[in-house]
Image: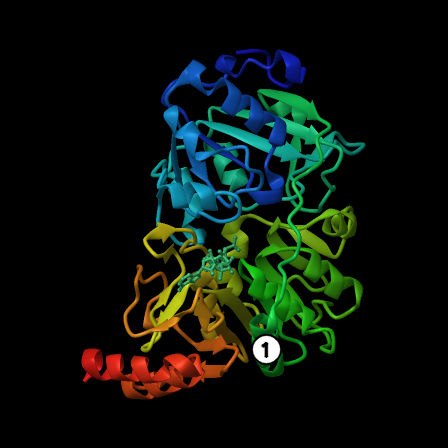
Amino acid sequence: MPAPGRQIALADLDLAQFIRAGDSIVWGQSAAEPLSLMQAYVAQRHRFARTCVFLGIGGSATLQPEHADAIDMTGYAAGGSHRTLGMAGVLDPVPCHYSQIPLLIASRSIAVDVVFVQVSPPNDAGECSLGLAHDYMAAAMRSARCVIAEVNVDVPWVHGATLRLDKVDAWVQSDQPVVDVPAGKSGDAETAIARHIASRIEDGATLQLGIGNLPDAVLQALHGHRNLGLHSGTIGDRVADLAEAGVITNTHKGIDAGVSVTGLLMGTARTRRWAHRNPALRIASTDYTHSARVLGQINKLVAINAAIEVDLTGQINAEVVAGQYLGAVGGAMDFLRAAAISPGGLPIVALPATARGQSRIVARLSGPVSTPRADAGLIVTEHGVADLRGLSLSGRMQAMLAIAAPEHRDTLSASARQYFA
Ligand SMILES: CC(=O)SCCNC(=O)CCNC(=O)[C@H](O)C(C)(C)COP(=O)(O)OP(=O)(O)OC[C@H]1O[C@@H](n2cnc3c(N)ncnc32)[C@H](O)[C@@H]1OP(=O)(O)O
């Protein structure tokens, strides 16, 4: 292996110097994807076949289903660009709570041999910032035999974890634009859902935001609020908007006074500009962002996560649509549980009442239970809010029917009698 810390020109990058057959590889998720290293890995994959990857949310379309000819693909999610892998059936998902991933990596229940990490250029002290993703990258780097860094001038220097280039096995300089993740688009349903949720959120609450269009719609509805806090697994442009508008101040959070905390930044240049050297923002590891011990110290924690479908008793599927894996267990339950016991907190799962003409409020789930009904709190559709906390099964069914799309209620009600009589 080359001497530690050596810079390698991309044209000379021979990954067979670092990767062995059978290795398991991890890289930064979403906007933190080190594009040049990924492209080299995919192009050279037959030289060290077979290797295995543990995937997070996809950033670029570099990894494609046909690359399963040399790569075994596992991961905790089929989000972002990795949806195509889930839909093609080449991704073998690992159902686990997001909070568990660092522990699973440390114990090698999830093996990590090689890490590709994208970092900012070094500061005057020679420290690069992990920039757009801390999450489980620190755990992965601790466990790996080999770490290769990709330095990109586009990556902001974000307070939190740092990495010195003399500590990695090799590094490359990339001039490719960082992956952009634009904010989600809101239709009528998302806008109505966002209004319902915003009306329940009190000033001074601390927000956690899940993945998909809905969290972004909610953020847009919060511009009239004051002194909100932010502690989340991921954030993007809409959080940057609220922070710069002075709505997010983190003054009432209970921990990390004045500082927004996240594991990932999934945004565009707008987020990267806001994040760069911003003392009011910190990226943190999953051990911190999703830890029950940490979340238990947050006041008025409002967890806002999306779902594929919810049954009439509150069981939540966030993983599978029509037999295809396109979601995750993710951090939803970590945050829902914490929000349920946070004084003034709200455990929220939101979803449009229909998709492709089908009701997403269902009598029986068509996929797995990602979050059990005992952990369901407020379920929100464009038709209203079903607060399931403390409700009996029959009470839950009534509340859930009231937020289903009106055209599906009779059928659902008949099925409910059949299944739950
Ligand atoms: C890093 C961290 O912070 S972890 C914390 C948060 N993480 C989690 O909660 C993990 C689990 N959650 C997720 O993965 C996502 O939030 C999801 C999958 C539940 C929702 O993601 P979204 O992108 O909002 O999904 P969306 O509602 O658009 O559905 C995806 C597609 O399936 C379709 N679909 C969804 N539900 C159904 C359904 N019940 N029947 C038929 N089709 C459906 C939608 O129409 C859409 O299709 P399209 O892309 O052709 O329009």
Badge 1 is on which residue?
192
Residue 317, position in %: x, y?
Answer: 37, 63
> x and y percent of residue 1 in the render?
52, 11
Q: Which residue does the image show at 40% across and 56% down from the upper left? A: 329
Of residues 128 and 82, the one nearer the viewer is 82
Q: Position of residue 413 (x, y in %)?
A: 30, 84
Q: Can residue 388 be seen in this snapshot?
A: no
Give SS at disc 1.
helix
As drawn, is 359 to the left or to the right of 284?
Answer: left
Residue at 79 percent of width and 62 percent of height:
244
Say above or below: 24 vs 136: above
Report x, y in % for residue 268. 71, 48
Lateral position of residue 233 relative to residue 404, left or right? right
Residue beneath the point at 68% across and 74% down: 222
Observer-nearest of 97 and 413? 413
Against 122, residue 273 (above or below) is below
Q: Would you say residue 131 is visible in this rendering? A: yes
- The residue lying toward the viewer, choosing from 49 and 2, is 49
Q: Is mark 1 within 8 Å of ligand 1?
A: no
- Image quadrant in which the C terminus is located: bottom left
Q: Label 1 sits on what residue type?
A: Ala
Q: Residue at x 56, y 38 (%)?
A: 28
Corner quadrant of residue 158: top right
Task: Tell which of 421 and 7 is nearer to you.
Answer: 421
Q: Is residue 347 above or below residue 384?
A: above
